[in-house]
């Protein structure tokens, strides 16, 4: 089966909302029920790609084939499958190296399963430990990796360099980050903790134009996936024998890194992303 793998690099904080909440955050981001990992649903990605195609490519015939007719008369939902975007690397504040880009075997091996010839598999990591590259900048003078207020025992692993090399090859220098200096592999439950607690929460207010004070009830908090986050998703032909629309999409998005806006708060600069695409044959 032919499909495209897309790596999504968040240039600015990203908010794909999960509705209202009864907790302290009024507008949380969407999370997987079973892992609490943030993700972007395929429907949001499909809408974003369609908007880009409509405004930039301006080929209505192919647009209807790829995404489905806009008039809603046809029961054809389009010839291309858009998968959910899963979290791959999460930025976390670090005592050394400014920030770490964290992943875990669970998060990484999802990508390995989708493209096993491009990305190596990852074995389990012990809780309380952090696997890093021999070239890392994350190790403190005490020999530990300190993320937020927690310290982890560091383990230098050449396998982490293999991961960064696979990412660098896929991204083709489209992301200006020294991955081998920032990448850290955490145990799954440790990564889950940071995925829950290390996302940004920003306060928003609406000012009364006459009194210049906050209007009653006009203070709310929104959650964002931090800038520098990396997610991945896939697209594939719905029916292999009718793969021509998928190839048309591939031909347009494969040129360098595609700049798109995902999620909400577009007018305040949120959701700016670079999407790098490669074709994978299985």
Image (cartoon, helix red, strand yellow):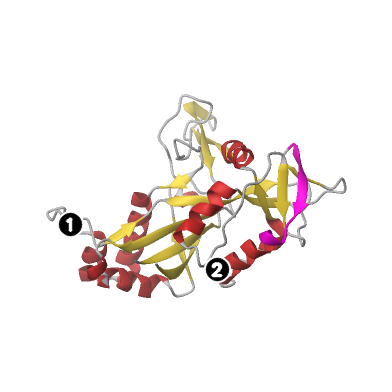
Residue 78, image x and y in percent?
23, 59
Q: Residue at point 45% right, 59% down?
A: 114
Q: Residue at point 55% right, 68% down?
A: 171
Q: Which residue is mark 1?
A: 76
Image quarter hosting the C terminus: bottom left
Q: Secondary structure at mark 2?
A: helix
Q: CA distance from mark 1 to mark 2?
A: 33 Å
Q: Which residue is mark 2?
A: 171
Q: Which residues are magenta?
A: 149-160
Residue 186 horizontal side relative to residue 79, left or right: right
Mark 1 in CB contact with mark 2 (< 8 angstroms): no
Residue 15, image x and y in percent?
48, 45
Residue 97, image x and y in percent?
76, 54
Residue 139 horizontal side relative to residue 186, left or right: right
Please rate how many residues cluster around mark 1, counting C-alpha atoms within 10 Å: few if below 14, some from 14 to 19, many from 20. Answer: few
Give the mark, 1 or 2, whose residue is nearer the N terminus: 1
Q: How many marks?
A: 2
The answer to whether 106 is drawn above or below residue 119 in the figure is above
Is-magenta flag for residue 121?
no
Image quarter hosting the N terminus: bottom left
Residue at the front extreme of this rendering? 123
Q: Residue at point 73% right, 57% down?
A: 157
Please rate how many residues cluster around mark 2, counting C-alpha atoms within 10 Å: few if below 14, some from 14 to 19, many from 20. Answer: many
């Amino acid at each position: 089966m032919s499909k495209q793998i897309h790596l999504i690099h968040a240039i600015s904080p990203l908010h794909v909302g999960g509705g209202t909440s009864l907790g302290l955050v009024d507008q949380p981001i969407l999370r997987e029920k079973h892992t609490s990992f943030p993700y972007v649903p395929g429907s949001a990605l499909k809408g974003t790609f369609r908007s880009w195609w409509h405004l930039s490519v301006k080929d209505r015939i192919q647009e209807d084939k790829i995404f489905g007719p806009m008039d809603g008369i046809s029961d054809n939902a389009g010839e291309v499958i858009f998968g959910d975007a899963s979290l791959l690397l999460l930025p976390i504040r670090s005592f050394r190296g400014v920030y770490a880009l964290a992943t875990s075997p669970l998060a990484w091996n999802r990508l390995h399963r989708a493209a096993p010839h491009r990305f190596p598999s990852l074995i389990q990591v012990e809780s309380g430990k952090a696997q890093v590259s021999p070239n890392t900048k994350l190790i403190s003078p005490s020999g530990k990796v300190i993320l937020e207020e927690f310290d982890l025992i560091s383990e230098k692993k050449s396998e982490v360099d293999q991961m960064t090399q696979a990412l660098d090859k896929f991204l083709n220098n489209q992301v200006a980050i020294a991955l081998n200096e920032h990448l850290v592999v955490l145990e799954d439950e440790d990564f889950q903790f940071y995925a829950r607690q290390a996302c940004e929460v920003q306060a928003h207010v609406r000012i009364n134009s006459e009194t210049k004070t906050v209007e009653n009830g006009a203070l709310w908090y929104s959650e964002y996936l931090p800038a520098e986050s990396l997610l991945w998703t896939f697209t594939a032909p719905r029916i292999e024998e009718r793969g021509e629309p998928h190839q048309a999409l591939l031909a347009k998005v494969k040129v360098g890194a595609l700049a798109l806006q995902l999620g909400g708060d577009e007018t305040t600069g949120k959701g700016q992303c670079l999407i790098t695409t490669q074709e994978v044959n299985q």
